[in-house]
Amino acid sequence: MKRNVGAFDGLVRMIIAIAIIFYAGLVGPWWVGFIALVPVVTAALFYCPVWDIVGVNTCHGD
């Protein structure tokens, strides 16, 4: 599995995940917080399968 998520992109994904978690905890239903798992996992693995299909690569180190 080749990396296709760069450092800045991973940071943005983590910020989005935190925002989703706060939304779920304060306003929305609690189960919406599980949606935050997607950006957390893709940022932690530095790999996004959707971007692999589309051909996007923000990881400039490889």
Image (cartoon, rainbow, N blue to C red):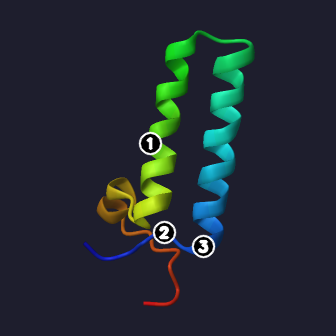
Pointer 2 local density, CA inside 10 Å: few below 14, some 14–19, many at least 20:
many
Mark 2 = which residue? 5
Q: As drawn, which residue projects farthest toward the right?
A: 26
Residue at mark 1 to residue at mark 2: CA–CA distance:
13 Å
Q: As drawn, which residue projects farthest toward the bottom?
A: 61
Residue at mark 3 to residue at mark 1: CA–CA distance:
16 Å
At a point 47% along the width and 27% down the height, the residue shown is: 34
Mark 3 = which residue? 7
Task: Looking at the image, tell me whether mark 1 or mark 2 is earlier in sequence order.
Answer: 2
Q: Position of residue 3 (x, y in %)?
A: 38, 75
Q: Position of residue 55 (x, y in %)?
A: 37, 69
The one nearer the camera, 51 or 35, is 35
At a point 50% along the width and 59% down the height, the residue shown is: 43
Q: Amino acid at mark 2?
A: Val
Pointer 3 local density, CA inside 10 Å: few below 14, some 14–19, many at least 20:
some
Mark 1 = which residue? 38
**Quadrant location of the C terminus?**
bottom left
